[in-house]
Image (cartoon, rainbow, N blue to C red):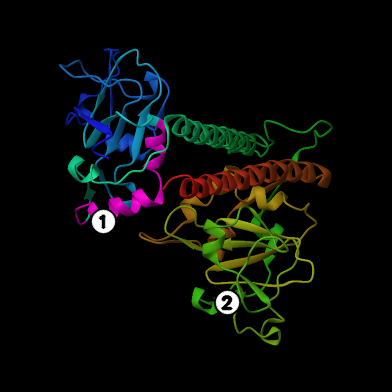
Amino acid sequence: MGEIVKKLKSYPLSRDVETKERTGYRYIHYGDIHKQIADLIVQDEDLPSIKEGDYIPLNQGDLVLADVSEDYTGIAEPSIILHEPKTKIIAGLHTIAIRPQSATSLYLYYLLHTERFKKFGSHVGTGLKVFGITFNNLSLFQIKTPSFPEQTAIGNFFRTLDDTITLHKRKLDKLKELKNGYLQKLFPQPGEDVPRVRFAGFNEPWEVRSFENILAPAVASNTLSRAELSYEKGSIKNIHYGDILVRFGVYIDIARDPIPCIANGRIIDYKNKLLQEGDVIFADTAEDETVGKAVEITNISNFQVVSGLHTMAYRPKIKMSPYYLGYYLNSHSFRYQLLPLMQGVKVLSLSRKNLSKTLIRYPAVLSEQSQIGDFLRNLDEQIFTLYNKLGKLKQLKSFYLQKMFI
């Protein structure tokens, strides 16, 4: 690499040089590279302003690499200036700035994302808790380049792919933001009797009942650890509290969602502990305030499902529309009541006794419950679809990164 790039001036500028004033100077800090604030830079405003100084600025097409990382995969993580800067852009703290001489900038930028380069970085990187790389070591990386037209075509191909990924990310973020907004508006907030937004045709007052009047303990939970569960063997599906907290949303589609089974479970041992459609499972333990997260059981069909470690299973005492409880019990409208009921220091827990102290609000008309649940579920399905598309695009990019460079 040392033969095809020129090393540029970097400055040990830390965060204390940043300013809100428009000074005409901006910089690329290694931390912003790792956070992808500085990545494919297309406008000056993407970067923080800094105080004026006697600096040598960067040009369009220059690359700035982070020379330190907390792991080997982040060594020499690159950013690239794709536009003609209107201000003076400086390479800041813990960066290596380079200017391609006999390679196109985009081609080199994507080359630095390949698995081959990452492996190289892990070999030449130094350090224990923090790993670093020098320009001298970076320059030892062996590069084979095609013709300039082919380099340009490769760079443009990946840029188009990245633009598509960015577009899907923005759509996903907007949908998540939209959903969060509706979660605030479709359920009564603290001190309110009805939600701020209601579907047309509904004006009846909402019901307010104690938790115990709406939900009753369903079945006993088990204490099986992860080691006793399997995705390969077993027929009894087990809802583990860790999956409630991390993997599942507000409802579980039993027929669709991957759920581990009890590896050596016998149905005769669990026949009195089986969950039913519409049951709600709470996680009673967490390391943070996510304790008390709930999931509603849906599409259970003929599957055998049980409530696992650190969970509390409840069953509605009255008819409730599908999906309503799943969304309501995870909304701020309900969860603000849980905060003073959580116990513990490093690990928080929630007891059945404390959970019973809460109130549940719901529309008396089932069709209004149904509209709320279906509307939010439709948003979640759109989010799920976009999330999967985004994952496939990232996999496609990773595949081509390995196939289009040597």
Name the side, left or right, on which 116 lies relative to 89: right
Per the image, label 1 sits on a secondary structure element best described as helix
**Is residue 309 shown above or below 215?**
below
Tell me the amino acid under the disc marked 2. Asn
**Is residue 315 shown above or below 122?**
below
Q: CA distance from mark 1 to mark 2?
A: 47 Å
Residue placed under numbered mark 2 in the picture = 222
Name the side, left or right, on which 373 lies relative to 113: right
Taking the spot 62% from the left edge, 33% from the top edge, the residue there is: 178
Tell me which corner region of the image, top left, top right, bottom left or bottom right, holds residue 200: top right
**Which stretch is magenta?**
106-128
Tell me which corner region of the image, top left, top right, bottom left or bottom right, holds residue 97: top left
Q: Nearer the viewer, mark 1 or mark 2?
A: 1
Tell me the crowding category of disc 1: few under 14, some 14 to 19, or many 20 or more residues within 10 angstroms, Cα based. few
Of the numbered discs 1 and 2, the one sitting upstream in the chain is 1
Name the side, left or right, on which 90 lies relative to 324: left
Per the image, label 2 sits on a secondary structure element best described as loop
Residue placed under numbered mark 1 in the picture = 123
The answer to if 107 sits in the magenta stretch is yes
**Is residue 20 shown above or below 151?**
above
Who is closer to the viewer here, 290 or 125?
A: 125
Residue 153 visible from this viewpoint: yes
Q: Which mark is residue 135?
A: none
